């Protein structure tokens, strides 16, 4: 009880109670821009990181049928055995990597949970995690939560945003433990070929690194087949392969992903998974089974459509006079806006307000993203054509002043 | 049919307003090649016409559409073709299909009113010599036509910005 004239003890700010590793994560640049975009009207959005297709009906129907049959229970922690079997077959047939469904594959709530599990299973405080940037926004904050330290490695448009062996070598220290690879890349659309991977694999072996490879866009490559890092000689046991159904099968809202790797790593990931998530949702897993069994034709049709729109957008930016490297994967173009003299944020904000087009400023994706904007071409041809016209007018206006 | 032509046809079916320049960019093939392929497809009547799919229920001046099952006696030497031709030449007839199963021709009729369609069936179609019987089904509502869903309930529900 506080008596009169007695100074009360200073109450701590609620912020002081928070776990510093969480508290000190900077707010997401995407979130900030999202709020601005939501408040704007009549805007065409190229800011969306997901397919514009709706999950094919047969996949949705399989899930509905499962519900009708009362399949509403928990599944095994690692996921339905049939789904794991199918993923094993799919990875072998598509990317020539063989995983044992019983102890090398775990079904997760989206690729995002798989990334979290892999980092939590592998990274201890003080470990350094090598990360090429620009890249997907979630890796670095999760590394911070584990107590690990992100070591960003810049990639460049002149290299088509590939990770080069020279730059990887230059960032190695005795504390380097994990290398994260996100190819095909969000936001750049960069891909790595078998030849690009070989010298990287050599460094990984020489320096005894572990690898987390996020292959969520593996099906979305143009003019070449995706090469999984895990398929390189000697790399499978060092690699946690992460993928999911979101991009290839237009299933973002289902939150269905998976991770594959050495049984010891998967067992460690499973420990975290079973105490936090328990299992991925039963109905989403039923949809995943249907997608893998009967969804390949539909997937090919969607990829063909992305490819057509990719060409349209890249040409559009070049015609406008914005340099744009050719993205060979995912569904993003990453044009340079450096020639306009504006920063990424300035450009994106003014484009949103004055040009009525939402694109994501490149700097939110980390080192090397400044001077670029990310434009998703997962939207209709009509919208893309209109958006390019608006961007063209906006750029012309900036250059005139 | 080569692969390029098939891709062109798929794009034109998606939107007949796509021009050769746009298709050229989307397929990564020179514009002249696309224009030549389209010309060939038009000349050999693979592309019969560039049409518009209209949801007439949006217009006050509604049309009445009926599907009529027609049983006929095939003609010696020309099978079903002669009568099919006699039927499809009527302007009221929108489509005619030769069918397997319980009847021979499926005829789609469009008219301004129920009375008009009924009149056509009773005075023009049923009275043709080779017609044995007709069964008329009026279309109450069109949900999907030529692959296009009329009342789009699966719009774009995505957030404007996402990672």
Image (cartoon, rainbow, N blue to C red):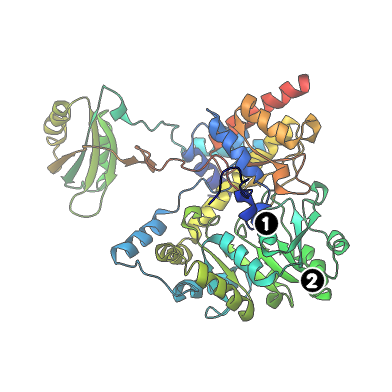
Label 1, secondary structure: give it: helix
Residue at figure coordinates x 49%, y 36% from the top left: B15
Label 2 and label 1: CA atoms lie apart by: 32 Å
Residue A226 in the image, given as x and y percentages of width and height: 66, 62
Residue at figure coordinates x 42%, y 31% from the top left: B51
Chain of the residue displaying label 2: A
Chain of the residue displaying label 1: A
Q: Earlier in the sequence, mark 2 or mark 1?
A: 1
Determine whether A183 is above or below A276 in the image.
above
Task: Please tell me which residue lies in front, A231 or A156.
Answer: A156
Q: Please tell me in which quadrant of the rendered image residue A22 appears.
A: bottom right
**Can residue A203 be seen by looking at this rendering?**
yes
Q: Which residue is mark 2?
A: A204
Count of numbered circles in the view: 2
Q: Are marks 2 and 1 on the same chain?
A: yes
Residue A348 in the image, given as x and y percentages of width and height: 68, 34
Determine whether B130 is above or below A16 in the image.
above
Q: Which residue is mark 1?
A: A20
**Can residue A183 be seen by looking at this rendering?**
no
Q: Please tell me in which quadrant of the rendered image residue A181 appears.
A: bottom right
Residue at figure coordinates x 45%, y 75% from the top left: A76
Circle 2 packing at 10 Å, graded few (<14), some (14-19), many (20+), is many
Determine whether A298 is above or below A340 in the image.
below
């Amino acid at each position: 009880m506080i008596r009169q004239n007695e100074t009360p003890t200073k109450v701590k700010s609620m912020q002081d109670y928070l776990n510093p590793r969480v508290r000190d994560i900077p707010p997401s640049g995407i979130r900030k821009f999202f709020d601005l975009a939501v408040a704007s009207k009549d805007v065409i959005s190229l800011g969306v990181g997901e397919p514009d297709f709706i999950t094919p009906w047969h996949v949705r129907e399989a899930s509905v049928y499962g519900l009708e049959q009362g399949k509403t229970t928990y599944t095994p922690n690692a996921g339905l055995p049939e789904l794991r079997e199918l993923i094993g077959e799919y990875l072998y047939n598509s990317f020539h990597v063989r995983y044992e469904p019983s102890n090398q594959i775990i079904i997760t709530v989206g690729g995002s949970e798989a990334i979290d599990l892999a980092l939590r299973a592998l990274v201890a405080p003080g470990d350094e995690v090598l990360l090429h940037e620009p890249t997907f926004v979630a890796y670095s904050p999760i590394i911070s939560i584990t107590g690990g330290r992100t070591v960003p490695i810049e990639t460049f448009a002149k290299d088509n945003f590939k990770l080069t062996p020279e730059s990887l070598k230059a960032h190695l220290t005795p504390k380097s433990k994990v290398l994260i690879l996100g190819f095909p890349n969000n936001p750049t659309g960069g891909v790595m070929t078998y030849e690009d991977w070989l010298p990287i694999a050599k460094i990984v072996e020489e320096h005894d690194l572990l690898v987390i490879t996020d292959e969520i866009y593996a099906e979305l490559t143009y003019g070449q087949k995706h090469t999984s890092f895990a398929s390189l000689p000697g790399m499978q046991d060092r690699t946690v392969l992460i993928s999911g159904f979101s991009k290839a099968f237009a299933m973002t809202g289902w939150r269905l992903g998976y991770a594959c790797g050495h049984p010891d790593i998967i067992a460690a990931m499973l420990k975290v998974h079973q105490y936090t998530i328990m299992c991925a949702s039963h109905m989403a897993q039923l949809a995943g089974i249907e997608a893998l069994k009967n969804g390949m034709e539909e997937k090919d049709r969607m990829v063909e459509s992305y490819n057509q729109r990719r060409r349209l957008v890249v040409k559009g930016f070049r015609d406008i006079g914005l340099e744009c490297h050719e993205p060979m994967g995912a569904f993003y173009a990453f044009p340079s806006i450096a020639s306009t003299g504006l920063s990424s944020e300035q450009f994106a904000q003014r484009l949103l307000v004055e040009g009525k087009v939402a694109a994501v400023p490149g700097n939110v994706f980390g080192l090397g993203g400044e001077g670029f904007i990310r434009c998703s071409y997962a939207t209709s041809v009509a919208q893309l054509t209109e958006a390019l016209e608006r961007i063209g007018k906006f750029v012309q206006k900036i250059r005139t002043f | 049919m080569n692969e390029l032509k098939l891709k062109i046809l798929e794009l034109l079916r998606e939107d007949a307003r796509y021009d050769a320049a746009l298709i050229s960019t989307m397929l990564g093939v020179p514009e002249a090649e696309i224009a030549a392929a389209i010309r060939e497809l038009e000349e050999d009547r693979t592309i019969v016409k560039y049409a518009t799919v209209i949801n007439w229920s949006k217009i006050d001046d509604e049309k009445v559409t009926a599907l009529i099952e027609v049983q006929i006696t095939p003609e010696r030497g020309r099978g079903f073709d002669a009568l099919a031709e006699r039927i499809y030449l009527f302007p009221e007839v929108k489509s005619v299909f030769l069918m397997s199963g319980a009847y021979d021709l499926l005829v789609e009729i469009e008219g301004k009113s129920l009375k008009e369609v009924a009149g056509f069936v009773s005075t023009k179609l049923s009275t043709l010599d080779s017609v044995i019987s007709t069964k008329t089904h009026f279309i109450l509502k069109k949900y999907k036509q030529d692959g296009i869903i009329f009342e789009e309930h699966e719009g774009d529900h995505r957030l404007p910005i996402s990672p």
